[in-house]
Image: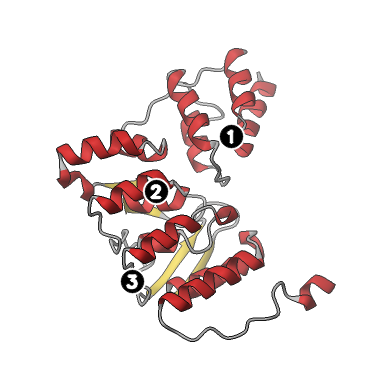
């Protein structure tokens, strides 16, 4: 059985639908804890972001896993059509808030647009913005005065730069770039937890260069340029990308 747990968790880590299905077919129950945590929580809390996430989640749900919040389920499945139908029927649900574990930027008291931005789910992000979701909604601030970020913070240094299309969508929708946070705890509760202070979307983008974030220098450079241009600021040459000194080591 331990091998099946390893197979399941490995499938979550790489978003391998085949490995997840194999573990379930061989006896693991999608509705029961795996190593003291629900399989669906293992999946959503993993750090990988990819187009395969939705298929992995749908498989778990088909096999008996549950997400108690229907709106959150739609966002995590990137089900834009279903979400749009529900929100058109009840527009007040655009203000719905959730709290969930996030491997990267926190999702405490987060809007649905925060969640869509964190996972790079373009279809639901587009629906939310088109229906009038607040692109400058702030997440919860903790007891130490940290966090309180807007959705664009989730897009500026995302895993594999997956949220770049949403960053551009938010900029088109006039997401503010002059917001300044006292600080933010990235990866809270994980071994890579890092608390960062005095953040704007641009400075947070640059923090993607920290080694624990494992982001591409060229992606971060391009994002910073895009954000500077959107702020009507001059863009310096920034010619040393990737950093030749670091590469030489």
Between disc 2 and disc 3, whose residue precedes?
A: 2
Q: Alpha-carbon neighbours of circle 3 within 10 Å: few (<14), some, or many (≥20)?
A: some
Q: Residue at x 46, y 47 (%)?
A: 119
Question: Residue 240: x and y, percent?
Answer: 71, 79
Q: Does dot 2 land on a helix, a strand or a loop?
A: helix
Residue 171: give x, y in percent of width and height.
Answer: 38, 66
Q: Which residue is mark 1?
A: 12
Residue 234 is situated, as x and y percent measured from the top left of the image, at: 49, 86
Q: Quadrant of residue 81?
A: top left
SS type, badge 3: loop
Circle 2 residue? 116
Kindly identify which residue carries mark 3: 176
Which of 144/65 is in front? Answer: 65
**Image quarter of the C terminus:** bottom right
Q: CA distance from mark 1 to mark 2?
A: 19 Å
- Quarter that holds the N terminus: top right
Mark 3 or mark 1: which comes first in sequence?
1
In 3D space, how far apart are the residues under numbered discs 3 and 1 (Cα atoms)? 34 Å
Q: Which of the 4 image quadrants contains residue 21?
A: top right
Mark closer to the observer (1, 2)? 2
């Amino acid at each position: 059985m331990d091998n099946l747990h390893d197979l399941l968790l490995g499938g979550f880590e790489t978003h391998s639908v085949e490995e997840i299905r194999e573990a379930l077919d061989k006896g693991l129950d999608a509705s029961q804890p795996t190593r003291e945590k629900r399989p669906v929580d293992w999946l959503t809390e993993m750090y990988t972001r990819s187009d395969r996430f939705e298929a992995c989640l749908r498989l778990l749900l088909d096999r008996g896993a549950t997400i108690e919040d229907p709106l959150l389920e739609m966002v995590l499945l990137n089900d834009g059509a279903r979400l749009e139908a529900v929100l058109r029927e009840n527009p007040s649900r655009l203000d719905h808030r959730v709290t969930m574990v996030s491997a990267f930027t926190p999702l405490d008291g987060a809007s649905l647009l925060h969640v869509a931005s964190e996972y790079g789910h373009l279809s639901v992000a587009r629906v939310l913005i088109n229906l009038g979701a607040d692109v400058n909604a702030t997440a919860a601030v903790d007891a130490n005065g940290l966090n309180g970020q807007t959705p664009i913070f989730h897009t500026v240094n995302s895993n594999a730069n997956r949220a770049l299309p949403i960053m551009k969508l938010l900029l088109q929708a006039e997401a503010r770039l002059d917001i300044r946070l006292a600080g933010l705890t990235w990866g809270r509760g994980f071994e890579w937890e890092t608390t960062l202070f005095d953040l704007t979307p641009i400075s947070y983008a640059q923090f993607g260069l920290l080694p624990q974030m494992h982001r591409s220098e060229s992606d971060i450079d391009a994002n910073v340029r895009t954000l500077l241009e959107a702020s009507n600021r001059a863009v310096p040459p920034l010619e040393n990308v990737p950093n030749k000194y670091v590469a030489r080591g």
